[in-house]
Image (tube, helix red, strand yellow):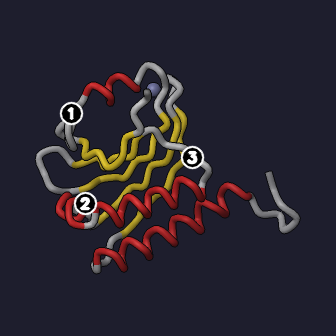
Amino acid sequence: MGNIFGENMITTELLKNRAGFEEKIRKLIGRPILLIELDLFALPCGCAGITANMRGLEVDDLEVFEPQLIALLKEMAANLDVKPTVSFARLVPGSSIVASLNWRTLCQRCYPEFARGEGKTPRPDLYLLQFERRK
Ligand SMILES: [Zn+2]
């Protein structure tokens, strides 16, 4: 999927969004936060989405800047044409460290697992930022 310049559209978009998201999150939080890897993924079950592996982000940041972060998450999803059912942070178990931010379009099998959970932390390693409940 190259364009007339011989560039790959997907990787060009990923590179642009990696840099843009990192810059915005640094400005928002005011610390040198790194987005060390931005991935598009597909799972055998049918789930698909985006993972942003982070360095320097803490659970406290999610609590303090949640509305602004959710706006940045929505912007990234729209830029990469992903319509997530759920957006969440994955935490390093037993710590306040955010390992990654995740956007996931849930398959039929995984949806109930997320829908069952209550509150912000349905599992100790997850911090929910946004969840589209099915009617
Ligand atoms: Zn799934």
Q: Nearer the viewer, residue 85 or 95?
A: 85
Q: Residue at x 13, y 52 (%)?
A: 95
- Please tell me which of labels 1 and 2 falls first in the chain: 2
Question: What amino acid type is highlighted by mark number 1?
Answer: Glu
User: What residue sits right under mark 3 in the picture?
Assistant: 82
Is the distance from the Cβ of mark 3 to the nearest ligand 1 atom less than 8 Å?
Answer: no
Q: Residue at x 34, y 75 (%)?
A: 28
- Foreground mark, 1 or 2, reads 1
User: What residue sits right under mark 2 in the picture?
Assistant: 62
Q: Residue at x 47, y 56 (%)?
A: 74
* CA gap, disc 2 and disc 3: 22 Å
Farthest front residue?
135
Residue 118, which numbered label? 1
Question: What amino acid type is highlighted by mark number 2?
Answer: Leu
Task: Residue 132 in the image: state x and y as whole percent.
Answer: 41, 38
Q: Is residue 92 left or right of residue 51?
A: left
Q: Nearer the viewer, residue 73 or 58?
A: 73
Question: What amino acid type is highlighted by mark number 3?
Answer: Val
Task: Residue 85 in the image: state x and y as whole percent.
Answer: 45, 38
Q: Residue at x 39, y 55 (%)?
A: 53
* CA gap, disc 1 and disc 2: 18 Å
Disc 1 element: loop
Q: Residues within 10 Å of mark 3 (few under 14, many from 20)?
A: some
